[in-house]
Image: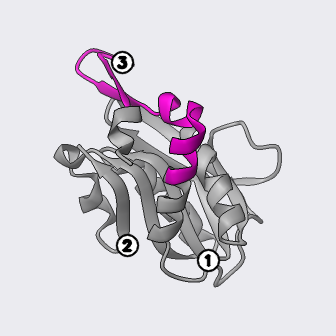
């Protein structure tokens, strides 16, 4: 199945010059959604204790992957959205600055973690998420993505990790 036909490009969103990759057509098609989940599950090549998803589009497949891999799901969210005590990590993205947070009890020392997000762009968000996971003592087994925007060279910020994606632009 050609998953790229389910990805809609939205020019100049959220700001001029950004070509946003909209995954909602993929999510809306049951067959494409199932196939995509199967392919993402095949990317995971080791026993995983926790699947960490990055807000917000990373949550869609991260929680499904956790179920498929018999692992727990951990959300990483933007600041101020998690109700318990958190660790915070600022980061730069292709169109500004932000910060991510994780519950301080979300990952135990030595747990094997798969980090998932929908798109790998400049790598700032994923690198910030990796820092939070490692601060809690998690071992990042893999960073996987639905889409990698290769021209932004985000994987260079994740060189110490195994990085896999289903589609590249």
Q: Is residue 12 a member of the stretch shown in magenta? A: yes
Residue labelled with disc 1: 48
The structure residue drawn at horizontal position 49% and vertical position 46%, both measured from the top left corner, is 90
Marks counted in the figure total 3
- Write the start and end of the magenta stretch as one range: 7-35
Q: Tell whether 151 sits left or right of 86.
A: left
Of 50 and 32, which appears nearest the observer? 32
The structure residue drawn at horizontal position 44% and vertical position 61%, both measured from the top left corner, is 144
Q: Residues within 10 Å of mark 3 (few under 14, many from 20)?
A: few
The structure residue drawn at horizontal position 28% and vertical position 52%, both measured from the top left corner, is 154
Q: Is residue 62 above or below residue 45?
A: above
Counting residues from the N terminus, which is met first, the one under dot 1 or under dot 3? 3
Counting residues from the N terminus, which is met first, the one under dot 1 or under dot 2? 1
Disc 3 element: loop
Query: Which callout, 1 or 2, points to the residue nearer the camera?
Result: 1
Counting residues from the N terminus, which is met first, the one under dot 2 or under dot 3? 3
Name the residue at the left extreme: 151
Residue 51 found in image quarter? bottom right
Q: Is residue 111 above or below residue 61?
A: below
Of 155 and 71, which appears nearest the observer? 71
The structure residue drawn at horizontal position 39% and vertical position 19%, both measured from the top left corner, is 14
Residue labelled with disc 3: 13
Is the Cβ of the residue at disc 2 closer than 8 Å to that at disc 3?
no
Residue labelled with disc 2: 161
Disc 1 element: loop
- Coordinates of residue 28 in the picture (x, y in percent): 58, 31
Q: Tell whether 105 sits left or right of 29.
A: right
Is there any visible trace of residue 26 in the rendered image? Answer: yes
- Coordinates of residue 91 in the picture (x, y in percent): 43, 45
Q: CA distance from mark 2 to mark 3?
A: 29 Å
């Amino acid at each position: 199945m050609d998953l790229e036909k389910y990805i809609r490009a939205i020019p100049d969103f959220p700001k001029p010059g950004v070509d946003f990759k909209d995954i909602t057509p993929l999510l809306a098609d049951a067959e494409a959604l199932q196939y995509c989940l199967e392919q993402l599950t095949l990317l995971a090549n080791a026993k995983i204790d926790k699947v960490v998803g990055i807000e917000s589009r990373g949550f869609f497949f991260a929680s499904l992957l956790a179920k498929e891999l018999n692992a727990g799901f951990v959300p990483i969210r933007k600041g101020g959205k998690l109700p318990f005590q958190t660790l915070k990590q600022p980061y730069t993205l292709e169109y500004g600055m932000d910060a991510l947070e994780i519950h301080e009890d979300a990952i135990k020392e030595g747990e094997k973690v798969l980090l998932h997000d929908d798109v790998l762009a400049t790598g700032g968000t994923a690198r910030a998420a990796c820092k939070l996971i490692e601060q809690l003592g998690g071992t990042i087994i893999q960073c996987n993505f639905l889409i990698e925007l290769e021209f932004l060279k985000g994987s260079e910020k994740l060189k110490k990790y195994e990085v896999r994606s289903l589609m590249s632009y």
